Image (cartoon, rainbow, N blue to C red):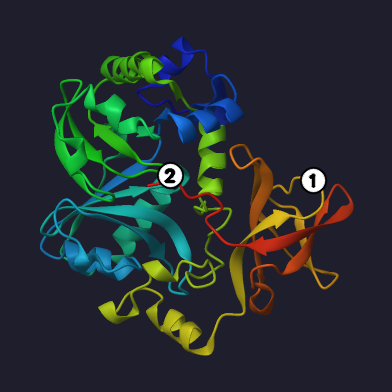
């Protein structure tokens, strides 16, 4: 099983460890609900070093990244980040990712842990005609996320960088705990926060994590595992690859049309997506709440007009909102807010209704 360089710290903190796509990671420390609500009210510290980091650099790096992704890379400037999709020829997802513009024709891509090798191979194959060097640097990086209302307060105790100058989806370079780092104002929780990337050994990585946790106690900030990471992102209406988005649903069907820039020029899946936009989609990912009692989980059947149509892509009892929520694909004519449908839970069909997403919005 793979271990992040923060692994030792998780055992010191008595995290409940699980096998997550062959990574030894904590699903929780003190409890999913407690950790979830701490992030919403004070803050949380996450080891996300299992995420993949791929560097694209060279004379045609812009053209290469532009060709394999949905968003318009040409709109980025050094220090800017955007969210996008790595696309198939059918306009569906190989993965979703963040693109960091380091400099002209130099990009740093952050991809999902389980997809790193797949994404790297796919990018190498599809960008072969371009003059670009693509390297998988995932093993070099430790990534720690600090999320929540007091994230800036905590991180400011470890750096001389003016964190207030880093706006949402921007990044800079500097020192954190006297370690050279890339610091971005990004996250996967729906809260304000930062993601810190460093290249250090195991002792230093675990030390950084433990130092953040110790200092965080002053502010009610706690270490957070994979369990709350998932419930937080769902409350915030953020898609999870393999659940809500995949290689069988297009960008438009996933209700992510805002990352799709059809006018930027040629890219993988453009013709299919252009045609789909012109003709209209037949299904779409929606958020729902249960009307009846119960909790809908991933994989539960979804019924429309009495017939099984799809399955729940993500579902949980939302700890902060204190109600059951989820996401599922529905026929486009059934996607209007307030429309009711049914979900099969333990052999019984319960009512659910379409609601606006994100389910949770923080007070900015």
Q: Position of residue 40 (x, y in %)?
A: 48, 35
- Residue lying furthest front: 363
Q: Where is residue 171 in the image (x, y as percent from the top left)?
A: 21, 45
Q: Where is residue 357 in the image (x, y as percent from the top left)?
A: 55, 59
* 150 over 300 or under it: above or below: above
Query: Residue visible at 27% across and 69% down?
Result: 72
To which residue does mark 1 refer?
A: 294
Query: Residue visible at 45% across and 22% down?
Result: 222
* 302 over 172 or under it: above or below: below
Q: Which of marks 2 and 1 is nearer the N terminus?
A: 2
Comparing 149 with 295, the one in front is 149
Q: What element carries label 1?
A: loop
Comparing 103 with 148, the one in front is 148
Mark 2 nearby-residue class (10 Å; few <14, some 14–19, many ≥20): many
Residue 117 vs residue 309: left or right? left
Q: What element carries label 2?
A: loop
Give the CA separation, mark 2 to mark 1: 26 Å
Query: Residue visible at 82% across and 73% down?
Result: 305
Q: Position of residue 323 (x, y in %)?
A: 68, 44
- Residue lying furthest bottom: 279
- Residue lying furthest right: 347
Residue 82 vs residue 308: left or right? left
Query: Residue visible at 37% across and 53% down?
Result: 97
Number of numbered discs? 2
Q: Nearer the viewer, mark 2 or mark 1?
A: 1
Residue 140 vs residue 26: left or right? left
* 216 over 356 or under it: above or below: above
* 196 over 288 or under it: above or below: above
Residue 45 vs residue 358: left or right? left
To which residue does mark 2 refer?
A: 188
């Amino acid at each position: 099983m793979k271990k992040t360089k923060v692994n030792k710290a998780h055992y010191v903190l008595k995290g409940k460890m699980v096998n997550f796509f062959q990574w030894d990671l904590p699903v929780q420390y003190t409890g999913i609900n407690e950790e979830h609500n701490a992030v919403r009210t004070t803050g949380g510290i996450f080891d996300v070093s299992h995420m993949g980091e791929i560097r694209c650099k060279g004379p045609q790096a812009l053209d290469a990244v532009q060709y394999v992704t949905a968003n318009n890379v040409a709109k980025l400037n050094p220090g800017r980040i955007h969210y996008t999709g790595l696309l198939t020829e059918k306009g569906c997802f190989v993965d979703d990712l963040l693109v960091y513009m380091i400099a002209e024709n130099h990009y740093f891509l952050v991809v999902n842990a389980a997809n790193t090798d797949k994404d790297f191979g796919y990018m190498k194959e599809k960008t072969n005609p371009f003059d670009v060097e693509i390297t998988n640097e995932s093993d070099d990086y430790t990534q720690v996320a600090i999320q929540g209302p007091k994230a800036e307060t905590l991180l400011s105790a470890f750096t001389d960088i003016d964190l207030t100058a880093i706006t949402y989806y921007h990044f800079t370079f500097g020192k954190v705990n006297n370690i050279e780092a890339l610091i971005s104002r990004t996250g996967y929780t729906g809260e304000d926060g930062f993601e810190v990337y460093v290249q250090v050994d195991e002792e230093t990585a675990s030390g950084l994590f433990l130092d953040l946790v110790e200092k965080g106690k002053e502010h009610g900030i706690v270490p957070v595992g994979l369990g709350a990471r998932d419930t937080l992102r769902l409350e915030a209406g953020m898609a999870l690859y393999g659940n809500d988005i995949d290689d069988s649903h297009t960008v438009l069907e996933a209700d992510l049309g805002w990352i799709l820039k059809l006018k930027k020029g040629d890219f993988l899946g453009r013709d299919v997506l252009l045609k789909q936009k012109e003709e209209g989609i037949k299904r779409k990912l929606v958020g729902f709440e249960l009307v009846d009692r119960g909790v809908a989980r991933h994989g539960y059947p979804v019924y429309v007009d009495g017939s099984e149509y799809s399955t729940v892509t993500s579902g949980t009892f939302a700890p902060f909102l204190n109600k059951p929520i989820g996401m599922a694909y529905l026929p486009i004519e059934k996607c209007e807010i307030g429309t009711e449908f049914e979900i099969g839970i333990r052999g019984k069909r319960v009512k659910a209704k379409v609601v606006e997403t994100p389910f949770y919005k923080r007070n900015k």
